Amino acid sequence: MGRIEKTVFLSYRRTNAPWALAISQNLTHHGYDVFFDFNGIASGDFESVILENIRARAHFIVLLTPSALERCGEPGDWLRREIETALSIQRNIVPLMLESFDFGAPGIARQLSGTLAALKSYNALRVPAEYFDEAMERLRTKFLNVPVEAVLHPASPLARQAAKVEQSAASAAPTVTEKELTAQEWFERGVNASDLDEQIRFYSEAIRLEPDIANAFYNRGRAHHAKGDVEGALKDYNEAIRLQPDHAAAFYNRGFAYDNKGDLNGAIENYSEAIRLKPDYAGALNNRGLALYYKGDVEGAPKDCNEAIRLQPEYAFAFHNRGLARKPKATWRVRSRIATRPSASSPTRRPSMLGVRCSMQEAI
């Protein structure tokens, strides 16, 4: 008969932080030792702290929403690495399915490739916001109240101290309300919707319930932008940035909106801020390079394209734009005049033969 352990690692995507906090608070209240990266661990210590805390805990809970697995197809994605580590060391893995998550959905099935495909075989628990307490009781009494045979590896002093800091911060945070969790559900419905009007409606409801969800403003801005409402998009991007000043994707998309309006200075300023926040942002480098090209910056344009290509060696758009940037200087003035002339079909778009911008950043 194995022992009953009450040590838990909570794996989640940052967009689902209210859910993670609510679950952590509930389990901690019932005597569980829970670790999750609440405040954000310093980058230099992140890998060792995360992996050691997975190895030091018997149970591994992963929060699954329609948006959670979107980047798991990338080998270096941290949610993917956390799940792979738990699988490899045979922890008691409990997938929690939030807001209409479905293992059989086509987009989700594509993300659960390779070693992650095994996640589908684990017994999962659905957690509705309106029945949160009931779901947590079931989690504790059925899913975590099981004997484990896993070998637990003691964490290093650094990992143990990091866990204490995160636990203290989570304990001191205000209790998550049902209203906040319901707002998260509306947000995920927006992520899962394909119709732009539906997206706007869902994100608007999330914002009504919880007005400080930066990513709801960001994603609603993308939907407005896709519908051609650039001013509405800018308004939402501005609010997303006000709520989350380090939101690199919001700066990128705000730059893209200014680019659509023909405001090259505004576009360059926002692309530059996105790059400052995320130095490996190849799309922002490509787009800034093209904006610099339209302004006649013969030094800055190819430099940005070169850096985009260094970061993504198969980045076709950046190669195309670098070719434009290498044109003889004498041709730049006439091309710049052509580039800024409105077209009949789209008054704010430049002829695509002159340059290729990366499109809007994906939803979060």
Image (cartoon, helix red, strand yellow):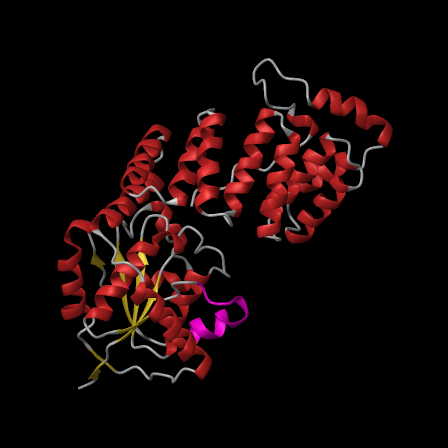
Left/right of residue 180 with respect to residue 342 in the rendered view: left
Horizontal and vertical percent position of residue 237: 47, 37
- Which quarter shows the N terminus? bottom left
Question: Is residue 282 visible to us here?
Answer: yes
Q: Residue at x 65, y 37 (%)?
A: 268
Q: Give coordinates of residue 165: x percent, y percent.
A: 39, 72
Where residue 253 sits in the image (x, y, percent)? 53, 38
Q: Residue at x 20, y 72 (%)?
A: 144
Residue 236 position within the rendered picture, expressed as x and y whole percent measured from the top left: 44, 35
Q: Is residue 178 magenta?
A: no
Task: Give the residue displayed 71% in from the left and 37% down from the top.
Answer: 321
* Residue in front for this viewpoint, 46 or 174: 174
Residue 356 visible from this viewpoint: no
**Magenta-tinted stretch:** 40-51
Magenta stretch, main secondary structure, is helix
Residue at the (24%, 74%) spot, across then down: 32
